[in-house]
């Protein structure tokens, strides 16, 4: 009679260990998603600031204007700790909307200018989505 209870404790101990490990992995994936969003915020601000320097148009008003989207991404980075997939979807929509607006305003010139920055941003978005998807999968698996 003692043997089945001991076996049950071993199995529940293994499951508890697995569950704890999965929770740690989920938190790690959320932090990776957050870091991708912070990196996107810095990348966008740095590229816009560089463009202002080239145009010699650096003043407090233009700095405030170029800080709007990076500040939104910084806010999304904090949201990513609770809802990583939602934060990534909103971030992707904002980025695509900003690029579409720039392309329409410049008559298509913005589509090819800054292609390296856009490529890095797309990479960060895809990587962030992968991290968010993994965190969401673990959350579903553990019924959290």
Image (cartoon, helix red, strand yellow):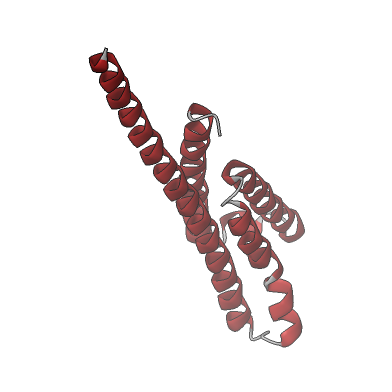
Q: Which quarter of the image is occupied by the N terminus?
A: top left
At x 56% / y 77%, what residue is drawn? 50
At x 32% / y 31%, what residue is drawn? 13
In this picture, is 2 found above or below 112?
A: above
At x 58% / y 51%, what residue is drawn? 80
In this picture, is 82 found above or below 133?
A: below
At x 48% / y 27%, what residue is drawn? 141
Where is residue 129 shown, x and y percent of the image? 52, 42
Number of labelled discs? 0
Q: Nearer the viewer, residue 105 or 25?
A: 25
Where is residue 135 shown, x and y percent of the image? 49, 39
In the rendered image, the residue lying farthest to the top is 1
Q: Nearer the viewer, residue 84 or 108?
A: 84
Apparent side of residue 4 relative to residue 48 in the rendered image (left or right)? left
In the rendered image, the residue lying farthest to the left is 3
Where is residue 32 shown, x and y percent of the image? 45, 52
**Residue 7 placement: quadrant:** top left
In this picture, is 17 found above or below 108?
A: above
Q: Nearer the viewer, residue 28 or 54?
A: 28
Q: Which quarter of the image is occupied by the C terminus?
A: top right
In the rendered image, the residue lying farthest to the front is 1
Apparent side of residue 19 relative to residue 73 in the rendered image (left or right)? left
Where is residue 41 shown, x and y percent of the image? 57, 64
């Amino acid at each position: 009679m003692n043997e089945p209870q001991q076996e049950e404790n071993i199995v529940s101990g293994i499951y508890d260990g697995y569950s704890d490990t999965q929770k740690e992995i989920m938190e790690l994936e959320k932090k990776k998603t957050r870091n991708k969003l912070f990196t996107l915020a810095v990348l966008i601000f740095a590229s816009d600031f560089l463009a202002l320097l080239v145009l010699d148009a650096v003043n407090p008003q233009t700095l405030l204007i170029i800080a709007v989207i990076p500040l939104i991404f910084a806010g999304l980075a904090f949201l990513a700790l609770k809802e990583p997939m939602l934060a990534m979807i909103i971030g992707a929509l904002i980025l695509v909307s900003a690029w579409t607006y720039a392309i329409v305003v410049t008559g298509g010139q913005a589509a090819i200018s800054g292609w390296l920055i856009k490529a890095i941003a797309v990479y960060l978005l895809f990587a962030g989505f992968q991290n968010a998807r993994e965190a969401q999968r673990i959350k579903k698996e553990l019924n959290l």
